[in-house]
């Protein structure tokens, strides 16, 4: 058995591998770049070795550094995770040549499945159904156009060395073919250093079905059933589940048997995935499911397979790499329940899914309800150098409906700030009627367009929830005080009726909120440094004190007002002083917190109504700034 394992990866998959290795009594070594010096996978491993600058090309993709780190620490095996060097046959061979155990398939198996055109020819010879198309060596535009005309439109052009949705173009009409071919080749050359393409018949109602396979060095190969990964955005998987909805036993037996034949055709060892495209125009049928490609590594979505089979796939990888036989036979494997996984990304769906990087000041993930696979903790940061995944959220239930409900509940309850996430988008996908019926295709998200990313304006309940969260520290302090006449001081005023109203702001709009009417509002909220957040379906709305946002007074009004009853504890200016935008004018103590009120723009203090020690009421004008004349 392996005694010390180096993980040639980062983030959540590195943490995932470390967890299983520790349970097996195997020591672990992490590698890290400059950007990951304090990362969770580094903190979790028994040892860690620095391997270079932040860009992956100078660290995680440099095989020599990784092998040297293994030698330096006395590791006897290397696990590549997924991505990076996991499907690099040359790196696998270098690991083996260095006298180390490679936790993965043989280099020859990786090479056999590395190019899509060669893999399809191999699969056709092994009796695996393949999508109609062309994988010939003649790459001239004239020959490709001739083949497309024979296949029939629409057709898909795919880079033979492609992956991740790159180097793919759908062509609907003959007049579009030449431009699409040139574009595909340019992208393929830039991404993979290979501009060769293959052609496939476009499936009009495509479902993405994949089968988990596992082989050992003793000639045994099993499958661990199928996953459905049809919910995709631009060929990137969004939500995956196992088993596949609508899969009958006869079709399952046919597709899984084909996957086993595919693995045996390349003498496969370790964990792998056979990916199929299904024409679901008449449901899932064995005669309409075709081989696409093989991923010769562990998949991102492997937890859903683990959840329905009770198998730890990383443990199997380590045992197979150590020379053991498969722990279970095909007859001993079965499906129990349903599992679904959502990929929580640091990205902004309302802005074209642009990555959102930076510190995770607030990170509250529903690990009490879901299986959470993550590579970050609260206080860590999402780096601009790598994939912006925050976590994989995995739910398991006895039925699909139960699993989906648990996943939705987890997404409702998570809280992340200030990094933006796709949580609301994931919930919108889960709630889509077609997805709920299990009838989705790979084009569903594209067809729905903005409907899945639109955010409705903040509502009345959220105003109240934000107000309550904004003053949560005050209420917490009040709860801790001894019972007595001063224990319920909300809205308390000297020599005046109590006023339970406070004024809060959201995106430039202000409202007076009655806190007594807000105490029964239910929802997810949290105080943060900038103010307070109210969450709707995973999307945060920020509420602040009025007339300033992030510590700055409103730029539309020179009156500096009290956001709530309180005491002025500092005044930094006198009438006639020239001030600049953002300069502190005075400090108000209220609700057991200090609030700095600042100048909204460059100007002059034209009025000052208070001094240090003054008690003021909500919305009282404390100071006035007259804007400097424009030049």
Image: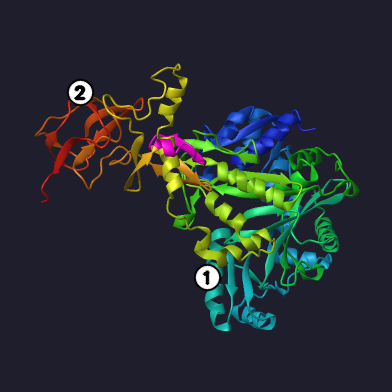
x 83%, y 39%: residue: 323
Residue under the image location 87 percent in, 43 percent down:
328
Q: In which quarter of the image is residue 204?
A: bottom right
Q: Could you tell me residue 313's position as x and y percent? A: 76, 43
Q: Furthest-left residue in view?
A: 576
What residue occupies the far right of the structure in this picture?
331
Where 204 sits versus 436, above or below?
below
Residue 517 inside the magenta-drawn segment: yes
> Which label was assigned to residue 74?
none
Instruction: Please state which of residues 370 and 138 is positioned toward the viewer in this rendering.
Output: 370
Query: Where's residue 290, x and y in %?
Result: 75, 67
Please determine whether, in this image, residue 245 is positioned above or below residue 33. Answer: below
C-beta proximity under 8 Å, tags 2 and 1: no
Q: Is residue 285 left or right of residue 421?
A: right
Residue 565: quarter of image:
top left
- For the N terminus, the image quarter is top right
The numbered dot on residue 612 is 2
Q: Which of marks 2 and 1 is in front?
A: 2
Q: Nearer the viewer, residue 70 or 35?
A: 35
In primary-sequence order, the first of circles 2 and 1 is: 1
Secondary element type, mark 1: helix
Q: In this view, does 390 lie to the left or right of 335?
A: left
Q: Can residue 383 be seen in this view?
A: yes
Q: Residues within 10 Å of mark 2 (few under 14, many from 20)?
A: some
Q: How far apart are marks 2 and 1 (CA)?
A: 68 Å
Q: Of helix, strand and loop, which one carries label 2?
A: loop
Region rendered in magenta: 515-530
Within 10 angstroms of label 1, few (less than 14), some, or many (20 or more) residues? some
Q: Please tell me which residue lies in front, 181 or 437.
A: 437
Instruction: Tell me where residue 561 appears, x and y as whole percent.
Output: 23, 37
Q: Report the residue marked by disc 1.
A: 183
């Amino acid at each position: 058995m392996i005694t010390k394992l180096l993980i040639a990866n980062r983030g959540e998959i590195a943490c995932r591998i470390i967890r299983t290795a520790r349970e097996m009594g195997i020591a672990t070594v992490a590698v890290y770049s400059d950007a990951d010096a304090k990362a969770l996978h580094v903190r979790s491993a028994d040892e860690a070795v620095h391997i270079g600058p932040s860009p992956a090309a100078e660290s995680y993709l440099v095989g020599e550094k990784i092998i040297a780190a293994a030698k330096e620490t006395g590791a006897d095996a290397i696990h590549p995770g997924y991505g990076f060097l996991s499907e690099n046959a040359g790196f696998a061979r270098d690991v083996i040549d260095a006298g180390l155990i490679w936790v993965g398939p043989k280099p020859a198996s990786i090479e056999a499945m590395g190019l899509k055109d060669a893999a399809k020819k191999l699969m056709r010879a092994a009796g695996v159904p393949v999508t109609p198309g062309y994988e010939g060596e003649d790459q001239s535009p004239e020959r490709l156009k001739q083949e497309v005309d024979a296949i029939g439109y629409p057709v898909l052009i795919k880079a033979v060395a492609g992956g991740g949705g790159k180097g793919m173009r759908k062509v609907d009409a003959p007049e579009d073919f030449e431009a699409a071919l040139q574009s595909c080749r340019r992208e393929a050359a830039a991404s993979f250093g290979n501009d060769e393409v293959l052609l496939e018949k476009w499936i009009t109602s495509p479902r993405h079905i994949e089968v988990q396979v596992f082989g050992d060095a003793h000639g045994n190969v099993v499958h661990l059933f199928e996953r459905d990964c049809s919910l995709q955005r631009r060929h990137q998987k969004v939500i995956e589940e196992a088993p596949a909805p609508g899969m009958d036993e006869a079709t399952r037996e046919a597709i899984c048997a084909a996957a086993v034949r595919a693995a045996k055709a390349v003498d496969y060892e370790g964990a792998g995935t056979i990916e199929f495209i299904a024409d679901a125009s008449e449901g899932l049928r064995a005669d309409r499911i075709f081989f696409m490609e093989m991923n010769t590594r562990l998949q991102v979505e492997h937890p859903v397979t683990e959840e329905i089979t009770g198998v730890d796939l990383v443990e199997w990888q380590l045992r197979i790499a150590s020379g053991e036989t498969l722990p279970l036979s095909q007859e001993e494997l079965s499906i129990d329940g349903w599992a679904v996984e959502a990929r929580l990304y640091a990205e902004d769906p309302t802005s074209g899914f642009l990555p959102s990087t930076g510190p995770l000041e607030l990170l509250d993930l529903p690990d009490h309800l879901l299986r959470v696979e993550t590579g970050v903790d609260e206080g860590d940061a999402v780096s601009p150098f790598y994939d912006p995944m925050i976590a994989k959220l995995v739910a398991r239930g006895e039925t699909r409906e139960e699993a989906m409900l648990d996943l939705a509940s987890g997404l409702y309850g998570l809280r992340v700030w200030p990094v933006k996430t796709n949580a609301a988008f994931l919930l919108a996908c889960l709630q889509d009627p077609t997805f709920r019926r299990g009838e989705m295709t790979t084009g569903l998200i594209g067809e729905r367009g903005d409907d899945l990313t639109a955010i409705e304006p903040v509502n009345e309940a959220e105003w109240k929830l934000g107000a309550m969260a904004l003053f949560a520290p005050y209420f917490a302090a009040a709860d801790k005080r001894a019972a007595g006449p001063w224990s319920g001081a909300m809205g308390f005023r000297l020599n005046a009726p109590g006023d339970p109203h406070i004024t809060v702001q959201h995106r430039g709009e202000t409202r007076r909120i009655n806190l007594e009417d807000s105490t029964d509002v239910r929802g997810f909220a949290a105080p943060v440094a900038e103010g307070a957040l109210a969450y709707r379906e995973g999307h945060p709305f920020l509420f602040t004190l009025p007339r300033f946002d992030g510590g700055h007074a409103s730029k539309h009004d020179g009156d500096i007002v009290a956001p709530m009853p309180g005491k002025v504890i500092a005044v930094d200016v006198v009438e006639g002083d020239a001030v600049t935008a953002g300069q502190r004018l005075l400090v108000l103590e209220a609700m057991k917190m200090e609030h700095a009120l600042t100048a909204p723009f460059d100007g002059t203090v034209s009025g000052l109504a208070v001094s240090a020690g003054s008690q003021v009421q909500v919305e009282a004008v404390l100071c006035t700034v007259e804007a400097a004349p424009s030049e």
